[in-house]
Amino acid sequence: MSGAKNCPETTRQKMIGLMYLVLTAMLALNVSSEVLEGFTMVDDSLHTTINSTAVRNEDLFNEFEYLYKQNPAKVKEWLDKALMVKHKSDSLYNYIQNFKYDIIKMVDNGDADPEARNVINKENYDAPGEYALVKGNGKILKRNIESYRDFLISLSENSPTKQKMYATIFSTAPTKKGTPWEYAIFEMMPVSAVVTVLTKYQSDVRMAEAEVIQYLKSQTDVSDYRVNKIEALVVPNSRYVIRGSKYSAQIVLSAVDSTKTPQYFIGNSMIPNGKYEVNCTRSGSFNYSGFILLAGNDGNVRKFPFSSDYIVGEPSATISNEDLNVVYRGIDHKFSISVPGVAAENISVRVSGATVQKTSGGKFIIRPTQDGEINIAVYAKVEGKEILMGNNSYRVRYLPDPKAYLQYSDAGGITRLIQDGSLNKRMLRGDNVAIVASYGEDELIQAKFNVISFAMLTVFGSVETSGSRLSNRQLSDIERLEGGDYITFKNIKAVGPDGKVRNLGLIQVQI
């Protein structure tokens, strides 16, 4: 019976074979449904990130529009670039959205969700390959991503780190095994997995949009004033001087061409280098005026008049802030306060809107406790009476925003801070690892900031936590990362001694 292998199966054998196939399919379906449900969870998390980033982007544009209204000439160039970023980001985002919807329509037909969130036939392996590879739409998507990536890189020419980040996030290079990008994503992949990967690209688009807009906004230097005219200015050391000392003032132009040297006059007398000095031998009020001559680019000499005044008074208090030009709320400031002819122990200070503590001699510690400004009044004890010798007002500012750093211990146990760089997983598991906020190694202001919350974004999604330490969930995600993967710490919030909660910039680390 050599031909027994060609014998037809009996009805019972066919039934057993069919039952085996059904059982195998049911087992595969159970495993697949768990995996597919995981993709759905990741997709939902990515949409949460997209929504929060969209809110941030809207706020950035509102700030940009406000700055443009304040100074159109200076901000327009950067706002136009930001609007171009928004247009290209929306274009790629919407293209990916339609791409997902077209695939879902192939498997769910009339029941396809227009938002591409709820997929019925998640396990379908044929539709992604047919739509992306057979019909050629994968190559179009690849070209669109590459075009957007190159556009972002061109706008970040002054930041090689950002250029490298965009090149990595939007890389369309083949896999290590040489598989083309579009085949690695769409060939024999279930619809649920493909939708999640595409949503991840949409999230990357929104986050890159926020990064570039923030970068363009920082280029406006809106805290500076644009020069639109030339004026003569008098900059005195002080308009109030002590009898017996000198009144000194620097006369300058508010806009200066280094290739041209102005001529300075008080009355009709030229003064060298624009420096006017007078020996003050008597008290009282004094006025003076003059002009500056400057040749323009057209060869014509223009005349810029000026006038000023100063007061020579009897000895009074002098106040100098040893640390800063302004005072910051919530921290201590060292002041050196003296009154000519009065011993330090006979000087007292009263401050409205701040606490004051005398340390030694003419040294005082002043800590502002209110917004707006504080007034420092100096009293001298003369012949048993306290006499007001002078006062001065200082504007109160909130502390400048610190920078966010990832703190860790290196191989030698030395504490390090990093904002952008590479670390291994072992360093990220150390007891010293935390998100911190400070002014860095070159800080000029001593202030302690506490990180109250942050989020960690990886390929597995975004995980938020309170405090400054990594949560168990975040550490678990780090363990699952592979070499070359990126970790982005975002939504970092810190509070300083002034009580103000600040949103700090991103930290990015590559494994």
Image (cartoon, grey):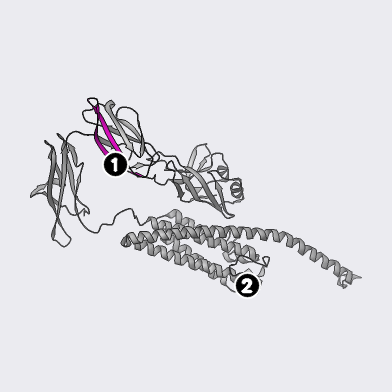
> Residue shown at 18%/54% (left/top)?
260
Q: Position of residue 149 (x, y in %)?
A: 48, 62
**Residue 104, quarter of the rendered image:** bottom right
Q: Do the residues bearing badges 1 and 2 touch, measured as CB atoms within 8 Å? A: no
Relative height, residue 43 to residue 264 (above, below)? below
Q: Position of residue 64 (x, y in %)?
A: 39, 60
> Residue shown at 16%/59% (left/top)?
296
- Taking depth in this image into account, of 358 and 384 the one nearest to the observer is 384
Secondary structure at badge 2 equals: helix
> Residue shown at 22%/58% (left/top)?
229
The dot on residue 26 is none
Which of the marked residues, 1 or 2, is nearer the chain's N terminus? 2
Secondary structure at badge 1 equals: strand
- Secondary structure of the magenta portion, mostly? strand
> Residue shown at 33%/53% (left/top)?
223
In the current view of this chain or complex, which residue is farthest to the right? Answer: 1
Does 398 sit left or right of 249 as displayed? right
Q: Position of residue 455 (x, y in %)?
A: 54, 50
Q: For residue 395: magenta?
A: yes
